[in-house]
Structure formats: structure tokens, C-alpha cells
Amino acid sequence: MTNRIPPPPNPAINRVEAKKKYLIVEALGIVSGSTVVVLEGNRTLTDYEYEYDDSYKVANGTYTRVKIKPGKSKIKEFFPPGSSVGVGLHNVATDEWSGQVSYDRD
């Protein structure tokens, strides 16, 4: 199959990182406006700003990185130091889910 752009893959997380104000998720199949971050399988982060950098955009229109800005106090609430938190992705347009990965904040 040549000269063909593959369809977007199902979401699949590669890496998660919580900074002071941001949550950064690197994954396959991130669709702008359709993919949301889910914590512990039930807490959907929809009320926060999602930032997509075009340098992480691939030919099929998906992104490999998204940065969410819940703010410093919410990052501390969502990811308490010393505890493990499950992070997943949900594409609400297709109802596809990534596997959940565990993130431990230092």
C-alpha cells in the first residue's frame, strides 16, 4: 500500500509526565478535540486547556503529544507525591480507549 495515509490508530500511551502546572502525555492516536485524559479509569479531565503542538502532528492528522494545563494545585491533587495514579486516554468520537498506564510523581 503506497501513496496512502494510514487511518488514526487507537490511543496508546508511551509516556506521562506531571510538571508544576502541566500534565504531558505522549501517545499514538491523539485526536485534537476528541481525545481526553482519564485518571483512574473514571476522572475525565475535560475542564482544562489542551495544547497541541504542530511539531508533534503526524501525516494522518493525529498528534503524538498533548499538554494539559490544570494548574499547580490540581496537579498536586491529581498526582500526590508517593502515590501511583492510573492515566488513560479516551477518544470520545470513536469510543476507543488506551490501556491505562501507572504514573508515580516524585
Image (tube, grey):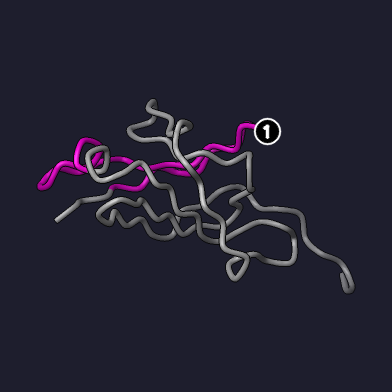
Classify residue 46 as left or right of residue 106: right
Q: Position of residue 80 (x, y in %)?
A: 15, 41
Residues 16 and 7: in front is 16
- Asked if 43 appears above or below 13 in the picture, the reply is above
SS of the residue under disc 1: loop
Q: Position of residue 73 (x, y in %)?
A: 22, 39
User: Residue placed at 86% from the left, 67% from the top?
Assistant: 4
User: Where is mark 1, residue-wise?
Assistant: 93
User: Residue placed at 37% from the left, 28% from the top?
Assistant: 43
For the C terminus, the quadrant is bottom left
- Asked if 39 appears above or below 64 in the picture, the reply is above
Classify residue 31 as left or right of residue 87: right
Q: Position of residue 30 (x, y in %)?
A: 59, 51
Q: Position of residue 55 (x, y in %)?
A: 60, 71
Residues 54 and 30: in front is 54
* Quarter assignment of residue 91: top right
* Quarter assignment of residue 84: top left
User: Residue placed at 77% from the left, 61% from the top?
Assistant: 6
Residue furthest bottom in the image: 2
Residue furthest left in the image: 82
The residues colored magenta run 76-102
Category of crowding for the residue at label 1, using alpha-carbon neighbours closer than 10 angstroms: few (below 14), some (14–19), many (at least 20): few
User: Residue placed at 87% from the left, 69% from the top?
Assistant: 1
Q: Amino acid at mark 1?
A: Ala
Indicate whether residue 55 is drawn in magenta. Answer: no
Q: How many marks?
A: 1
